[in-house]
Image: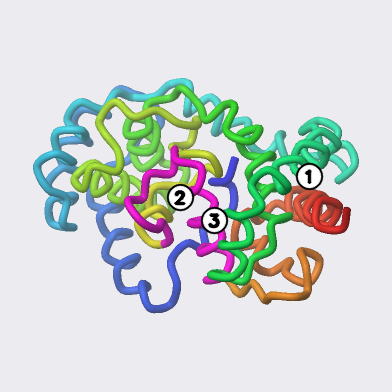
């Protein structure tokens, strides 16, 4: 659940844009059920258009459905990050991630060497995130991405947080990186390492297709570098960058442990 901590996705240089999009969230009336969703979409469409969303993105918004399963998952999300680091790692299969991560590090050595040369990010943390988020791409989710993220922008709990990502998802549809039918995780996260849509726009590399393994891993490295990753000090010395990825303490500590084990084999 990469979304849990991506509230830091906009840097100071993008603060003005965040303020604008926060205004979008306030202008369209939020709701706590699906009853007002269709009416909200009509208002949001005008504001999305003002934010630069084009015809394909607006069409995807018009076809979005209220994502009941996403709301149910969102209400229970904090339970997923409860307990000790050891119990969290056991629930999420930490030992398996380490074992498979070591194997994938060897079989994809050329890729990880290229990433480290380009971004300064060591393989372990990328493998730890990849394994934690999607089991190394084995399950990237089945929820409609546009419906999920638009529903969360509509929901009254955190519209200011999710609105920029909803706008981001619609812009990704415009440029062809997503389609109206694209699927992902429950909170609208995308691809192998589960980026939120706004983060794909900001940190995604190449064609921004994060269902491609190489693009996802390079984009993740780009994100970590932008959040202060320092080469040569390992995951334990880069907890701030990992916190940029996810603000849950147990997640951060688990990623650091797994990354250290993979890199230190």
Residue 144: x percent and y percent? 37, 26
Magenta stretch, main secondary structure, is helix
Residue marked by disc 1:
102
Name the secondary structure under disc 1: helix
In the image: residue 170, left or right of residue 220: left
Q: Residue at image x 45%, y 50%?
A: 215
Which of pointers 3 and 2 lies earlier in the amino acid sequence? 2
From which residue to which does the magenta span run? 203-226
Residue underneath mark 3 = 220
Please tell me which residue is depicted at 58% across the width and 64% down the height of the picture: 224
Q: In the rendered image, which quarter is residue 92 located in?
A: top right
- Residue 153 in percent (x, y) is at 36, 42
Quadrant position of residue 44? top left
Q: Label 3 vs label 1: CA separation? A: 18 Å
- Residue 213 can be seen, yes or no: yes
Tell me which numbered mark, 2 or 1, is placed earlier along the sequence: 1
In this picture, is 157 found above or below 259? above
Q: Are marks 3 and 2 in contact (CB under 8 Å)?
A: no
Indicate yes or no whether the magenta region holds residue 191: no
């Amino acid at each position: 659940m990469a979304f849990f901590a991506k509230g830091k996705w906009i840097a100071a240089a993008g603060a003005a844009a965040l303020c604008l999009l926060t205004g979008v969230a306030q202008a369209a009336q939020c709701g706590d059920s699906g009853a007002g969703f269709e009416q909200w979409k009509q208002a949001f469409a005008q504001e999305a258009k003002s934010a630069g969303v084009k015809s394909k993105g607006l069409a995807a918004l018009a076809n979005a459905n209220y994502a009941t399963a996403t709301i149910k998952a969102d209400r229970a999300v904090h339970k997923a990050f409860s307990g000790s680091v050891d119990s969290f790692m056991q629930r999420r299969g930490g030992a398996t991630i380490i074992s498979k991560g070591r194997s994938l590090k060897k079989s994809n050595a050329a890729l990880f060497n290229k990433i480290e040369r380009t971004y300064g990010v060591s393989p372990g943390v990328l493998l730890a995130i990849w394994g934690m988020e999607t089991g190394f791409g084995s399950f990237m989710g089945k929820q409609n991405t546009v419906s999920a993220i638009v529903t969360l922008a509509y929901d009254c709990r955190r519209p200011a947080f999710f609105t920029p990502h909803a706008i981001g998802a619609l812009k990704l549809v415009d440029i062809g990186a997503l389609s109206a039918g694209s699927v992902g995780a429950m909170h609208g996260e995308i691809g192998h390492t589960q980026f939120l849509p706004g983060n794909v726009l900001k940190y995604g590399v190449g064609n921004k297709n994060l269902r491609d393994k190489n693009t996802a891993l390079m984009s993740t490295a780009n994100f970590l570098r932008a959040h202060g990753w320092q080469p040569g000090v390992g995951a334990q010395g880069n907890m701030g960058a990992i916190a940029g990825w996810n603000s849950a303490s147990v997640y951060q500590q688990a990623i650091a442990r797994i990354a250290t084990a993979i890199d230190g084999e």
